[in-house]
Amino acid sequence: MVLRLWKKAVKMSTREKRMFTVFTLMYTVLIFWTSYSLELAFSSATAAQGFGSTSFLIALGASIFLTLLYAWIIVARNRRTWATLKCIGYTNGNINSIVLGHIFFTTLVGFLITIETLFHYMAIVGYLQAADTSMNHLVINLPIISLLPVLITVGVFACVQFIGYFLASSKITKVRPMLALKRVGE
Amino acid sequence: MPVAKDTMIEVIDVNKEYRRSGAIIRALVDINLTIKAGDFVIIQGPTGCGKSTLLNVMSGLDLPDSGKIIFDGENIARATEDRLSKLRRQKVGFVFQDFNLIKTLTAIENIEALLWPTVLSSKEIENRAIAALRDVGMLGRKDHFPVEMSGGEKQRVALARAIVSKPRVVFGDEVSGNLDPDSETQIMQLLKKINEEYETTMIVVTHRDSVAKYGNKIVRMSKGAIQSIK
């Protein structure tokens, strides 16, 4: 039953094309940025470590902000939908399952795009660093992002998504089913 | 000899107050009402007379301050939210003035949505949704989104959603409020047909006199109290 609600949430979120695309791309940028920052923070160079740590903290703050914003938008834009679902017999838990599906699917797609982007990034940087070309000096300091920062980023983003989920969950509990009976614009 | 109908909803000494800007508004005052299974009840009255509040408390959307609401033998006046959710899913259907279809779902998905949190198989859910769409004459539009439908068509899909779980009672809140006279006639005839074919109890709140003729019991309200029952 929960699996069915998640599947339907995926369908509903992909049909909200504009919001889905914008947030997926923002997550992609943030996940890439976080992995990149962590790679720098783990490097042996002291200057890179300092820059990487600061950059990681900024990325973390941005991802928490974005997640909370996304959760808030999902609840606020669809208050009438949640109220209608409560009217027709959905429990708070049922609606939370749908919201969880929305939030995690968007992040998952962002993560998959990041993985794809990282493959291309590493191929290009690796090639240009090895090749004796005029562009060599431009890429010589760019790090090859290893697996550990990517895995840590996944863990960090999963935790951050739960923060968003709990925010959405608490807001959904407050949506009263009677809202569905109010006229549009009332 | 006619068979006596079972009591579906019994409202006993129900009162409900709201506080707005410091003032106390008595939305329901000592309401007593008995609705039999299979009744088609029209609740009429001017804006602010308490008819929507009465619908809310009878359907378990809101709780009264005092009194009892006996719904199909169970007092729901002090029921928990989870219990009320279950009751609404199993025994109640809703038709709203603004249709309240989910815009990212097609007509058939909007109807199926009611059954998603149940243990029914996906095939069974689809079959029931198709049957409900057929009942309201909208099977040909099953893959259309709400934005592609007229007001009357949306309301027919909303009606299909209300009856897909074979509820004991369908509550309608100004169901024809956003419809032209032709669409109003179609929707009210459909409600009447469902009422007669499936013996579903219908409770419709309206301020329109044109709707009243479909009911077999007319409840008129004024200032939170029942004025007359015919």
Image (cartoon, helix red, strand yellow):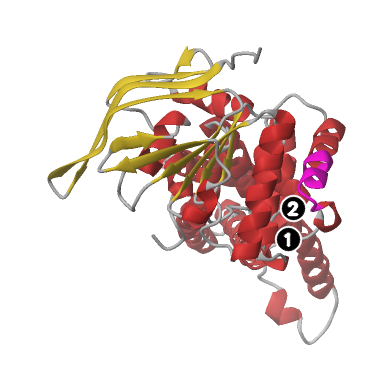
Residue that protrudes farthest toward the bottom in the picture: A134
Image location of residue B191, percent across then percent down? 65, 43
Q: Please, what secondary structure does the residue beneath circle 2 have? A: helix
Mark 1 falls within which chain? B
Residue A159 position by quadrant: top right
Residue B21 seen = yes
> Horizontally, is B38 left or right of B45 in the view?
right
**Residue at the location (69% across, 52% down)?**
B156
Q: Which mark is residue B145?
A: 1
Task: Pinpoint the chain carrying mark 2.
Answer: B
* Residue B132 part of the magenta-drawn span: yes
Query: Which mark, by number, is residue B153?
Result: none
Q: Tally the marks.
A: 2
The one of A166 and B124 positioned closer to us in this rendering = B124
Which of these two is toward me, B161 or A42?
B161
N-term-proximal mark, 2 vs 1? 2
Residue type highlighted by circle 2: Ala
Q: Horizontal and vertical percent for residue B50?
A: 32, 42
**Viewed as shown, does residue A104 lie left or right of B49?**
right
Most frequent secondary structure within the magenta stretch: helix
Q: Position of residue A31 (x, y in %)?
A: 62, 57
Residue under the point 66% across and 35% down: B195
User: Circle 1 sits in a helix, a strand or a loop, which is it?
Assistant: loop
Magenta residues? B130-138
Callout 1 environment at 10 Å: few (<14), some (14 to 19), or many (20+)?
some
Q: Amino acid at mark 1?
A: Phe
> Where, by quadrant of the figure, is residue B223 drawn?
top left
Q: Are marks 2 and 1 in contact (CB under 8 Å)?
A: yes
At x 85% / y 36%, what residue is drawn? B127
User: Label 2: which residue?
Assistant: B107
**In the figure, A142 relative to A136: above or below?**
above
